[in-house]
Amino acid sequence: MKSKLVPKICIIFALIFLYLPIIVVIIFAFNKTKSRTVFNGPTLSWFFELFKDHSIMTSLLNSFILAILASIIATVIGTMAALQIVKMKKSSQSVIMSLNYIPIINSDIVMGISLMLLMTFILNIIGGHLGFLTVLIAHITLCMPYVILTIIPKIKQTDPNLLEAALDLGCTPSKAFFKVILPQITPGIISAFIMAFSISFDDFAVSYFTTGSSFQTLPVLIYSMARKRITPKINALFAIMFVLILLMLIVMNYLDIKSEKTLKKKSLSSN
Amino acid sequence: MKKINNIIELKNISISFDGEKILDNLNLCIKNREFVTFLGPSGCGKTTILKIIAGFLKPNSGQILFDGENINKIPPYKRNVNTVFQRYALFPHLNVFDNIAFGLKIQNLPKNEIKYRVSRLLKVVNLEGFEKRKPSQLSGGQQQRIAIARALVNRPKILLLDEPLSALDLKLRKEMQLELKEMQQKLNTTFIYVTHDQEEALTMSDTIVVMNEGKVQQIGSPEEVYNEPQNAFVADFIGQSNILNGIMLEDYKVSFAQKEFECVDKGFKSKQPVDVVIRPEDLQIISKNKSNAKFTGVIDSVVFKGVHYEIEVFAQDMYWLVHTTKYFKKGEKVGLTFNPDDIHIMSKLFNQTTNVLSAEVIEHNKIKFMDIVFEKEDLNIDVGSNVKLTIPPNSISLVSSDFADLVLTLDSIIYKGAYNEMYFYLDDKDNNNQYILVTSENEEEVGTELGLKFDFNKVEVKRCE
């Protein structure tokens, strides 16, 4: 009995460690006063004020548009690159994969500063200012290695004969790709997209160095607000985001379990 | 006169990967509506031929004719050929109906015709009612049938099958062999089948093409290939055989196992070394006192194989494999006999009974060949002259590569009753394009690298003329 108690306590402790900060944020989103230490009774006013705050709403929208665009472009380019990488020889493949790893291991701040230096250098020649386009390019650079890393195992899992089978049955190479290969790697593409989106959406370091005054993402705005005093409106925003993510996870898990169950049922009835 | 109708003609096809020759100047015709099987060990190039016909591989040189027309430049999706893959390659995201209908939908056929043709094919492969299943919900045998249906529904002129039954268990495999043969006869389509299983080839084919190392060894009906193998490789690969070294004395007279025998073959040179093949079912075990006993020997081992006993008899210093329905006890003294027409004589695969290599005398009493230097006493040959070395096959031993004089890859191994005859391909600037023959009791696999050690006392040296 004792031996089972210890791991249970460990798990509970880990969960508390992970979720206590989030719970605190959510509780203080409902705090009547601006105090960050004393809870003075519940209110919803911070939520109303959040939606009235023009700068938060714009930067939220900015972050959202940026994340969507960056992750779509990174996924498309990354998928095409991954499809070519798996066709290479083993030796050159491992070289490319290690080159792909370096930006992932490298710290974001180094990447942010080097991207800023490169972009100001180029903008100096062609003219223009740091802004939406520079952040977008920077975010695509940031997300792409993760996309490649997520998709390659999925491509390697697919049977190489499938492409030959499609050609054999009359598909041109491009038709064979869209009808047979793409459906096989779609789950990989979706998870790569979700990962790219979340990396882009909560990136601070790269955005901070590559954005100008005209375009502010949410993390950059929060950072500039925090230098003065963080308002409970931000707590309200975090609470909403947390609930949304939680709902998304629940729905995804539910769909997973459902499809697994139907698969099991069918395979049982076939035997 | 009726013209012979060849649906596929391969002319001088050669192909190599990474410098290794897979097919070497291959010439072959396949008749329309035939069941042709390419049979050979793995790596012999049989799957490569299939991929060349399907269009997945382009030969380095040579022509592929389909119905008399060159199709070298036609891409796979425009060829009237369909393939059944070794691992089926069904599309996992599509159900059975959509898998089979795949090729028809690409052709944009009307919906009701697609439906009609798919349901008819499902009937042919005996899987009606499975339309909605996903491939992952089917057994191996069912997936196999779907793969066949998916290929046949396009009404190809040729169906290519790449070891399609290798993943199935024995009983199912035997059933499917008969079904495939039946299907081929019913549909009247050319089937080109690839397998390494000789029994499968014998069961199904109209014509068997036996291949080894990128070359055709024999083409013939199953009966021809089994009963009259053209060389020791074919005899060894198809069925079990006793293969012995012999010498053709004159027409209808051969000597092997230290005796002379009457046979039915002729046309060899006198004193020509030959391979002698006797099938185990043609050997009879009789009482040792009978006058027609060719040899007497001792039963060495008896294994029950269901239909027959597999018996090894030790006689004339070698082991004879015999298949018989009668039981004999181990250790029993018996006689062996066979008829003259049971002796199959064939010219040797490698025309070589010993090894002759070029070498050079580099110092007094020192000889060098292929970076190997050895001493030979009382050698009265001038320094710098070229010599020929005769190295008997039994003077070379197989050792671990650390102690070897030479490391080579085994190209062929044939059991000759008492020892294995091994051939190693040699590629050296002075001794190119030749084989080294080694006789050994070791059993090794073709393609492995083995270390060779020479016994230089047994090497003969002769001055070059």
Image (cartoon, coloured by chain):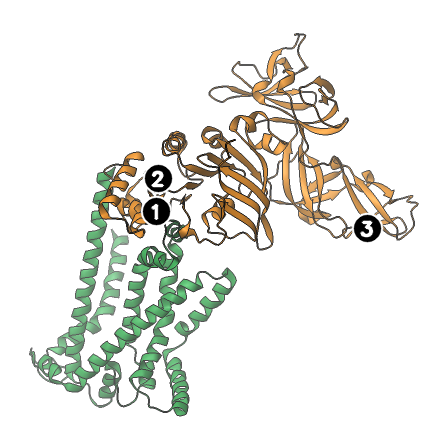
Chain colours: A green, B orange
Q: Chain of mark 2?
A: B
Would you say residue B133 is visible in this rendering? no
Q: Chain of mark 1?
A: B
Q: Position of residue A42 (x, y in %)?
A: 7, 77
Residues at marks 1 and 2 on the same chain: yes
Name the residue: 23% across, 62% down.
A12
Which quadrant of the view contains residue B282? top right
Residue depth check, mark 1 versus mark 3: number of the one nearer the observer: 1
How dense is the environment of label 2, judged by Cα within 10 Å: few (below 14), some, or many (20 and up)?
A: some
Instruction: Name the quadrant of the C terminus of chain A.
Output: top left
Q: Pointer 1: what residue?
A: B90
Q: Position of residue A43 (x, y in %)?
A: 6, 79
| Whole-number angstrom distance, CA of label 1 to CA of label 2 | 11 Å
Q: Secondary structure at mark 1?
A: loop
Q: Secondary structure at mark 2?
A: helix
Name the residue: 21% across, 83% down.
A59
| Whole-number angstrom distance, CA of label 1 to CA of label 3 | 59 Å
Q: Earlier in the sequence, mark 1 or mark 3?
A: 1
Any mark on residue B140, and which? 2
Q: What amino acid is labelled 3 in the image? A: Lys
Please, is residue B296 above or below residue B62 in the view?
above
